Image (cartoon, helix red, strand yellow):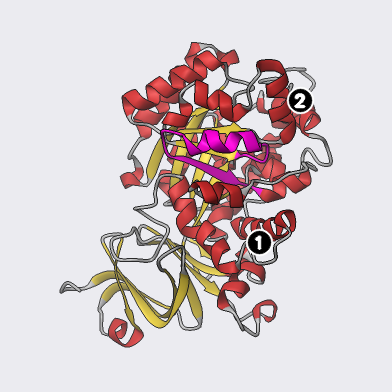
Amino acid sequence: MRGAGADLVIRSCTVLVHGEDEGIGFREDAAIVVRGGVVEAVVDAREGAGVEAAEVLDARGLVALPGLVNCHTHAPMVALRGLAEDLPTDEWFNDVVWPVESNLGARDVELGARLACAEMIRGGVTCFADHYFAMDEVAAVVAECGMRAHLGQAYFSSQGREGRERSLEFALRHRGSAGGRITTTLAPHAPYTVTDADLAATAVLAHEHGLPVHLHAAENRDQSETSLARHGATPVEVLERTGLLDTELLLAHGTGILDRDLPVLARAGGRTAVATAPRVYLRFGWPDTTPVRALRDLGVPVGLATDGAASNNSLDVWESMTLTALLQKSTTGDPRWLTARQALHHATLQSARAVGLGEVVGSLAPGRRADIILVDLDGPHTQPVHDLAATLVHSARSADVRTTVVDGRVLMRDRELLTLDVPEVVRELRQRLPALLDRRHGRRIQDYDT
C-alpha cells in the first residue's frame, strides 16, 4: 500500500470475495483500505489496524459486501406505492398508473427520486438503473445524495420524433456526470409502445454515440404471444430485426422469453443482459419468471431488480435476491439451483455487469470503486450462522444493512442517512398527492394493449 494516510479504512470485518467460475467466498478478520474513492487493498485486520485514515469504520461483527445494484426500476414511482393493488396488468396501466403519470411534474419526480434513493441507501443499494420521465431531476438527486446510477429518459413513439431526441439529449448531457457516478442510456419504453422504425433509429443512435439501450421486452407470455399473432415475431425477434441486439442492451423482465428466442439471443452481436424483478411477476399473477438458467447457459448476465414501487411496493433488492433463488428452485424443480452463493453472485457482480459496470463495481477488489455495505447479522432472525451465504440470502433483511458507502463516501452510518432529509420529502410529497392522483381528466400517457 502507498504511503501517507488513506481516505477510509473499514476495520475488522468479514469480506465477501469473488473467485473463479462465479465462486463466492468470505475472508474473515479483514480490513478494506480506500483511497481516492477506490478500493486500494483488502488486508488482514492486523495490517489494517496500522493504516492511518481520514475516516475509520469499526466493523467488528459485520459483513462487508459490494453495494447491491438495482438493475431496473422507476424510482419516482414510489409516489404511487400501494395505489393500484390486486389488478391485472392492463387495468393497472390503463385505469390507474398511466392516468396518474399524465399529471407528473418535475417536482413530483424529484421528490419521488429523493424518497426512492433514501429507501435504496437504507437497503444497501448503491447503484440503480432508472428508466423514467423528467430524468434531469433524477440526475440532480443522484448527484446530491451520492449514489451511483444508470439513467435513461423513457420515450414512446406516440411522442413523435421529439421523444427519441429528448432521450438522446439527456443521455449525452449527463453521461459521466456526478463525478463519473452517472452513466446514461437510450430508453425506448418497449416494442409494444415503440415502432420498429423508432427502435431501428435508436439502434443507429446507440452505435453513433456509443450509448447502451435499456427497455422493457418480453415482459410476460401474453406480450410474446400477442406480438407473434400481430407481427409474426416475438419481442426478442423484433429486437433482432431492428438491430437492438447488436447494441449494448439491458432488457427488463423477460419472463415472456420463449424457447424460440434462445438461439436469437445466442447470436446477438452486442452484449445483452436481462434484469429480473420476481416480486412483480408474483404480484401480477404471471405464469412464468425470468428463465435465469437458460440465459446463464447462453452467457447472458441476469441482474436483480425491483421494478418501480408501484408494481413491487418496495425497492428491496434483498427480497429480489431471495425470491430469485426460490423461484428458480420452484420453476426448474431442482433444489440445487440457484444456490445461495449463485444468488449472491447475481446480486453483486452479475448485476454490475448487467448495467455495464462490471469492471467498475460489483466486487471488493483492488481497483474497483469503493461501493461497500456493512451488514449486521447479530439479530435473532440471522442466528446462529451455519452457512454465511445462506444466512445472507435467506435470513438477512435490508434493515440489517448498517452502513452504506459509495465511491468511498459514507451515505449512511449506523442506519443514519447522511445525505437526504426524509421527513421533509414526505411532508411535501403528501401535500402534492391530491393533485398528482386526480384521474378525473380522463387522460393517459399511453394505452396498454397487448
Which mark is on residue 94?
2
Which one is in front, 78 or 280? Answer: 280
Where on the picture, by quarter, is residue 119?
Answer: bottom right
Left or right relative to 105: residue 380: right
How many numbered callouts? 2
- Residue 216: mark in rendering: none
Span shown in magenta: 253-277
Residue 14 in the magenta stretch? The answer is no
Q: Residue at x 66, y 72 (%)?
A: 395
- x, y percent for residue 298: 51, 46
- Residues 292 and 75: in front is 292
The N terminus sits in image quarter: bottom left
In the rendered image, residue 257 lying in the magenta stretch gets the answer yes
Whether the residues at callouts 2 and 1 have beta carbons within 8 Å, the answer is no
Q: Position of residue 101 (x, y in %)?
A: 66, 28
Identify the residue under disc 1: 322
Three-letter residue code for mark 1:
Thr
Work out whether 99 lies above or below 312: above
> Does residue 116 sit above or below 58 in this rendering?
above
Q: Nearer the viewer, mark 2 or mark 1?
A: 1
The residue at 31%/46% (across/down) is 179
| Numbered disc 1: secondary structure | helix
Q: In this image, 59 relative to 50: left or right?
A: right
| Residue 434 in sight here | no
